[in-house]
């Protein structure tokens, strides 16, 4: 498969996951409204702040992490991200997502980097959870799996190992999707903090060594963020 099809396939999977997770926020809201498994608690929302790219290095104080992409990778601009998640032109300021759009969004992609040669990609996104939600990462993954399956994305809930990235604990969900006669594999890493689900999505084409290689590109900004 050539690099153009790789890129199109990755963007298609990214958009599919994005749409599914946007739908998931309404599933979570419905459950909260019913107060069946998610009784409310005092709101402790901490608004995310955007990460910053300097050449091929992304740094996020909010996530306490650094991601160093190889120089051959391409980094999506805010205009490209806005097109993927349907942000109108009026919410772009100097080709960046405006503070107004950032504050109002329920689900936003903070960064997307793609290896145009292999199709491997890394995406970081945040989803605002309903106010008062007691949803934790495992429950989020289980509910998101239901929505993703409706989008014909196969899921693997059997990854019990948690990861420490930036001093936070991340739970894992595996995904697979058929695009252009190939299988795109995905790994969603989920952490919930301050009223937001923080999601790192890694997509790749079949080589299981890709995951540890990608994880090696992450490092913490400081060793112990906020007591974690």
Image: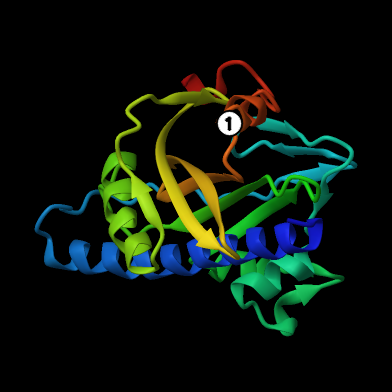
Relative height, residue 168 to residue 106 (above, below): above
Looking at the image, the residue that sits furthest to the left is 36
Residue 19 drawn at (x, y percent): 48, 69
**Circle 1 crowding by C-alpha within 10 Å: few under 14, some 14–19, many from 20:** some
Question: Is 19 situated left or right of 96 in this image?
Answer: left
Which of the 4 quarters of the picture holds residue 22? bottom left
Q: Which residue is drawn at 56% across and 63% down?
A: 179
Q: Which residue is drawn at 12% across and 66% down?
A: 34
Closest to the observer, 41 or 109? 109
Question: Is 30 situated left or right of 77 in this image?
Answer: left
Looking at the image, the residue that sits furthest to the top is 223
Relative height, residue 58 to residue 103 (above, below): above
Question: Is 28 situated left or right of 111 in this image?
Answer: left
Q: Which residue is drawn at 28% across and 53% down?
A: 133
Q: Residue at x 73, y 63 (%)?
A: 5
Residue 77 drawn at (x, y percent): 80, 61
Relative height, residue 137 to residue 152 (above, below): above
Residue 82 drawn at (x, y percent): 69, 71
User: Which quadrant is home to the N terminus?
Assistant: bottom right
Identify the residue under disc 1.
211
Can residue 132 be seen by looking at this rendering? no
Can residue 46 be seen by looking at this rendering? yes
């Amino acid at each position: 498969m050539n690099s153009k099809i790789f890129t199109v396939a990755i963007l298609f999977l990214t958009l599919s996951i994005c749409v599914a997770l946007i739908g998931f926020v309404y599933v979570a809201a419905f459950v909260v409204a019913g107060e069946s498994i998610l009784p409310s608690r005092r709101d402790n929302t901490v608004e995310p702040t955007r990460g910053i790219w300097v050449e091929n290095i992304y740094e996020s104080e909010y996530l306490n992490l650094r991601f160093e992409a190889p120089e051959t990778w391409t980094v999506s601009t805010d205009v490209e991200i806005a097109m993927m998640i349907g942000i109108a032109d009026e919410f772009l300021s100097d080709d960046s997502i405006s503070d107004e759009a950032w504050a109002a969004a329920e689900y936003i992609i903070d960064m997307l980097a793609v290896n145009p040669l292999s199709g491997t990609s890394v995406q970081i996104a945040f989803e605002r959870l309903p106010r008062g939600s007691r949803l934790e990462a495992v429950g989020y993954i289980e509910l998101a799996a239901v929505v993703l399956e409706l989008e014909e994305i196969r899921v693997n809930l059997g990854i019990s190992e948690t990861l420490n990235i930036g001093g936070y604990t991340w739970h894992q969900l595996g995904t697979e999707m058929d695009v252009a006669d190939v299988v795109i594999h995905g790994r969603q890493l989920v952490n919930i903090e301050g009223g937001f689900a923080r999601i790192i999505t890694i997509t790749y084409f079949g080589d299981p060594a890709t995951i540890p290689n990608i994880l090696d590109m992450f490092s913490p900004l400081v060793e112990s963020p906020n007591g974690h």
